[in-house]
Structure formats: structure tokens, C-alpha cells
Image (spheres, grey):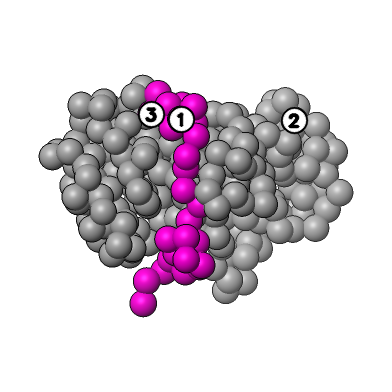
């Protein structure tokens, strides 16, 4: 059964009709290099503009009526694939993702993309609040913090809801995800870093100082030094930490744990992993 569900408007998708927004999406995509994969092209308004960049375009659409229309109207050089994007296998070679994401599938599509290592850039139209939160405007989500060492998230602007048909109840936003050429955390520490972020967001405490003390069992004096080195306030919340602060605190907490382990042969903290729970990642 297809994943896209909804009313008669192409499985719940709100089609982009605003030329200014289409131009902005195309301009953002033009800054990247390589073949383009478009999510949910609908009637092809954005697809035609992307094709003008002179790069291969693969449009992935689940609705058979839209697929038939696209294949009849689009220029040669655009490959139209009838598939559910959530189950479709992305290319194994480097590519760029562009799309007007069905709002009700935003989280599922973001998770698929984050766990797929072959794209270099993604330019997505999503709900305004989702775009802001993923770009850490007003505070980062756990998903964003867990992926920051590998992905840079930024905000490309706000899209008024009247730019879409049928008109949704909220504005959209342009979310840009760029893969870092050099990860800020090594592959060997990937799981440990994401576990650290998970524990920071889900543990009790009033501010990061209290939370760090709880999950690392370090002395308050040590935690205070970590925060000073990271340039973070003791009363800040996890959502308020920057990319550099997350990495600094992770490395210092990891070094403390390793030191404790060498001195007494036991881990310094009981993470959710040690309690038999699996960390939730975006």
C-alpha cells in the first residue's frame, strides 16, 4: 500500500504554484552539483525549472495519474519514476535532493534522508515551524543535534501558505541540509555521540550543568570547567547548545568516562544503552 495518503489532491500533497518560490528552490539547488532527485513532483512545475539547470533529474511520484501526465509533458532528460519515495531506493552515487515534501510525511522523509549517506545537499519545502526547528532557529531539536556533526542545517526562507494549492493551514519554510565534507565526529564515535545527545535531551535536570552531572556522575566543579571551555551557560537547555558546544561537551564527557573506566574498571554513567534501552535517533 502506498505511503502517501490523503484527499483527492494527489495523496495529501499541496502543490506549489508560486513562481517566486519555484525560482528560489531552483536557485538554491543550482548552488549544488550532480544529478537531482525530486520528491513528489506532482504536476511538474518545479521539475521543469530544475530541468533547466542542465542536470539529470529523476522525479519520484507515487500517483499514477500524475506519473502519466509528467511522462507526456516533460522534456526528454527527465526520468519519471512511479514509486513511494519512502520505500524507493535512493541512488548509490552522489546526488542532490529537492522537493515539496507532503507535510504529513515530513518527519518520515527527513529520517530516510538522514540515514541515507549518498546525497550531498537537500533543499526541501516543509512546514515553517519544522524548518525553523531543524535549522535550530529558536532552539534545536534532538534530531538536529544528533546529526549536526555530519549535516549542516540552515533556513532558506519562509513560504506563504497561499503559494500552495490546496492552501494548507500553515506557512511553509525552505530547509537546506548540507552534508559536511569532513565530519566533526569520527565514525567510531557516532553511536556514542548520538547516545550522549539522547541522554542530554531526555534526562532530568534544570539546565545543562545539572543534566551533565546526572548522566556523567562527574563533580560539579568538573562540569563547570567543561561548560566554561565550551562557552555554554550552566542554565542553558540542551536545545540552546550550538554545534561546537555539543561536540566540546561530548568530547570532555567522553574523556572523563574513559578516565573513570581506566581508574576503577567501571563506566562512569549508566546510559540508556547500559540499561538495555536503545537510543532514539532522528
Task: State yes or no: discs 2 and 1 in contact (Cβ < 8 Å).
Answer: no
Of residues 85 and 40, which is closer to you in this image? Answer: 40
Tell me, yes or no, if residue 252 can be seen here: no
Q: Which mark is residue 26?
A: 3
- Which numbered disc, 3 or 1, marks the residue that appears first in the sequence? 1
**Eyeballing the image, is 122 above or below 273?**
above
Relative image position of residue 232 (x, y in whole percent): 75, 30
- Residue 54 included in the magenta stretch of the image: no
Category of crowding for the residue at label 1, using alpha-carbon neighbours closer than 10 angstroms: few (below 14), some (14–19), many (at least 20): few
Q: Residue at x 68, y 28 (%)?
A: 230
Choose between 223 and 91: the one closer to the eye. 91
Q: Which residues are magenta?
A: 1-27
Q: Quadrant of residue 38?
A: top left
Res 232 label? 2
**Residue matched to label 1:** 19
Front position among marks 3 and 1: 1
Mark 3 surroundings: few (<14), some (14-19) or many (≥20) residues within 10 A: many
Task: List x then y, in percent, for residue 215.
Answer: 71, 55
Amino acid at each position: 500500500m502506498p505511503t502517501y495518503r490523503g484527499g483527492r489532491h494527489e495523496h495529501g500533497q499541496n502543490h506549489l504554484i508560486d513562481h517566486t518560490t519555484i525560482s528560489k528552490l531552483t536557485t538554491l539547488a543550482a548552488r549544488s552539483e550532480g544529478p537531482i532527485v525530486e520528491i513528489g513532483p506532482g504536476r511538474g512545475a518545479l521539475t521543469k525549472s530544475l530541468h533547466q539547470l542542465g542536470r539529470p533529474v529523476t522525479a519520484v511520484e507515487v500517483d499514477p495519474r500524475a506519473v502519466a501526465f509528467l511522462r507526456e509533458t516533460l522534456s526528454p532528460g527527465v526520468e519519471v519514476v512511479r514509486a513511494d519515495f519512502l520505500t524507493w531506493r535512493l541512488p548509490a552515487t552522489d546526488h542532490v535532493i529537492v522537493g515539496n515534501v507532503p507535510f504529513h510525511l515530513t518527519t518520515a522523509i527527513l529520517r530516510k534522508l538522514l540515514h541515507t549517506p549518498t546525497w550531498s545537499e537537500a533543499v526541501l519545502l516543509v512546514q515553517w515551524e519544522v524548518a525553523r526547528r531543524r535549522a535550530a532557529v529558536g532552539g534545536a531539536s534532538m534530531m538536529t543535534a544528533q546529526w549536526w556533526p555530519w549535516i549542516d542545517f540552515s533556513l532558506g526562507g519562509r513560504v506563504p501558505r497561499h503559494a500552495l494549492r490546496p492552501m494548507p493551514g500553515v506557512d511553509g519554510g525552505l530547509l537546506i541540509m548540507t552534508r559536511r565534507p569532513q565530519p566533526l565526529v569520527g565514525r567510531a564515535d557516532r553511536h556514542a555521540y548520538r547516545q550522549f545527545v539522547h541522554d542530554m535531551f531526555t534526562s532530568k535536570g534544570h539546565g545543562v550543568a545539572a543534566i551533565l552531572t546526572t548522566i556523567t556522575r562527574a563533580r560539579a566543579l568538573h562540569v563547570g570547567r567543561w561548560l566554561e571551555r565550551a562557552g555554554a551557560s550552566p542554565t542553558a537547555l540542551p536545545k540552546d547548545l550550538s554545534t561546537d558546544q555539543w561536540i566540546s561537551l561530548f568530547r570532555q564527557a567522553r574523556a572523563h568516562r574513559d578516565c573513570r573506566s581506566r581508574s576503577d574498571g567501571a563506566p562512569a554513567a549508566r546510559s540508556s544503552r547500559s540499561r538495555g534501552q536503545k537510543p532514539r535517533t532522528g
